[in-house]
Amino acid sequence: MSTLTLRPVREDELALLAEILAELDGDAPEPLDRVRHTWEAMQAYPDYHCYFAEAEGVVVGTLSLIVFPVFSHRLARDAIVEAVVIRPSFRGKGFGRSMLQAAIELAGSKGAYKLALSSNLRRLDAHRFYDGMGFARHGVSFAIETTA
C-alpha cells in the first residue's frame, strides 16, 4: 500500500465528494447544490473540514473532522470524525486504517484529547474494523430525530 495523505476537499471537487458519500450505502448522490451548501456551512467553523484521503494522487476515501473546545477534561479539546467512506475498490487494502490513523494524528496535533465517532448499529463490519483499530466502545449514544 502506498502512503496516504489527508487534504481538505476543494470546492471544485464537490461532485466527486457527493459520489463518494453515496457509495457508503449505494444511494444516489445528493444534489450538488445541497452538497455545496453544507460544505460552505462547514467553512464557517474553525477546525471543521471535509478531507479526501489520497494515495499516489488517487482519492481513495473521505471523512469529516471537527475539533472543538469542551468544558470537561480540564477544558480540553475534543474531536469527532464522521462521514467515513473508503471507495469500494480500495476497501480491504489498509487505506481505511491509514485514513483513520491520519485523522487521529491530525486531531491530536490540534490539541484534542480524544477522537470519537459513531456508527450505525447495522454496520457490523465497520464495528469490527473500529475495534481492531483500538477504538473503545465508550458510553451509549442516543439520538432523536427533529422536525428539520
Image (tube, rainbow, N blue to C red):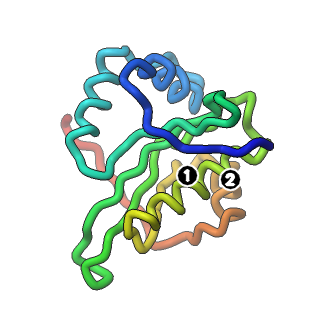
- Residue extending farthest to the bottom is 74
Q: Residue 121 shows which numbered tag? A: 1
Q: How many badges with numbers are in the image?
A: 2
Quadrant of the rendered structure where residue 5 is? Answer: top right
Residue at 51% over, 29% down: 21
* The one of 111 and 136 positioned closer to us in this rendering: 111
Mark closer to the observer (1, 2): 2
**Tag 2 secondary structure:** helix
Instruction: Check if mark 1's residue and mark 2's residue have beta carbons within 8 Å.
Output: no
Q: Amino acid at mark 2?
A: Arg
Q: Residues within 10 Å of mark 1 (few under 14, many from 20)?
A: few
Q: Residues within 10 Å of mark 2 (few under 14, many from 20)?
A: some
How far is disc 1 from disc 2 in space, using C-alphas? 20 Å
Q: Residue 97 shows which numbered tag? A: 2
Does residue 41 appear left or right of residue 125 in this picture?
Answer: left
Label 1 or label 2, whichever comes before in sequence order: 2
* The one of 92 and 138 positioned closer to us in this rendering: 92
Residue at 62% over, 36% down: 54
